[in-house]
Image (cartoon, rainbow, N blue to C red):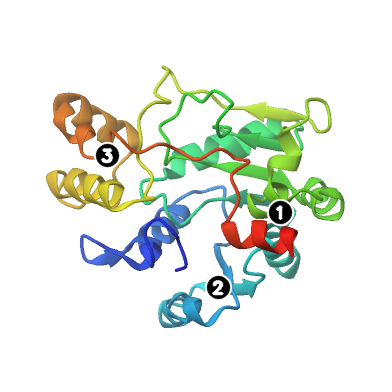
Amino acid sequence: MGSSRLPGKVMKDICGYPMLDWVVYRAKQASNISTVIVATTIDDSDDPIADWCAENRVACFRGSVLDVLDRFYQAASSAQADIIVRLTADCPLVDPMVMNDVIDLLLNESADFAANRLPPPFHRTFPIGLDVEVVSFSALERAWREADQTFEREHVLPYLYEQEGRFKVSILNAPQDLGDLRWTVDTQQDLDFIRAVLADLECDRNLSWLSILNHIKNKPELMQINAEIQHKSFKDVDYRMSNQEND
């Protein structure tokens, strides 16, 4: 709820459902995922998230506000998870089939970490907003123990991929390079884009990402809605964490 660019964004309405509902619903459609947990914070401002989870019978874990790696690790530990899939609640179009494919990649290649994208400055081929990261519990636990940089704690998994050779990393690429497409929600323009796309597609909650891509190709003016928004680097940190370091 404390997003600096779009406060309260995860509960913003999209076709009659809060954005968080879209993410949870689509995650539950992935056949390789057994349990979905919303990992939010202990801050009072996030009470609406916990309340929504309770009302909708969705598992909820509350942890650190700024040390998101700790929150993520503690949530995974509480669920006794062996393989953990990380999704972010500002990606309402995240695709269940992509989730399954990234999980399969991790398992088939015996990797520590698998993803369908890495954030800037790394190159990506999937649209921003289809982000899926998968990690073994042992690798997550090692990151939790060893990561000591502010950005590593805030962005959860950079410790897994920022240094080549530290872990076995596998990346799933899209059939074509679509990394410049922006389907995530960080700003009001992003939210306007998502709402416009889904309104055109009758708010179908089971749309595949390829169906969405086909629609946008046929109506390219939609991409102008949020064309000027820049994606953040994985080393960008919350100003509150920077202030802690300076205290």
Whether residue 65 is visible here, answered yes or no, is yes
Estimate the x, y position of residue 137 in percent, counting from the top left. 77, 52
Q: Position of residue 17 (x, y in %)?
A: 28, 66
**Which residue in the structure is indicated by mark 1?**
153
Residue 192 location, x and y as percent?
Answer: 22, 50
Say which quadrant the N terminus sits in.
bottom left
> Dot 2 corresponds to which residue?
59
Amino acid type of disc 1? Arg
- Left or right, 118 with respect to 146, comes to left
* Label 3, label 2: how far apart the Cα atoms are: 33 Å
The kind of residue tagged 3 is Asn
Q: Secondary structure at mark 3?
A: loop
Above or below 133: residue 8: below
In the image, 202 versus 19, the foreground residue is: 19
- In depth, the one of 44 and 228 nearer the eye is 228
- Classify 163 as above or below 36: above
Q: Which residue is mark 3?
A: 226
**Callout 2 amino acid:** Ala
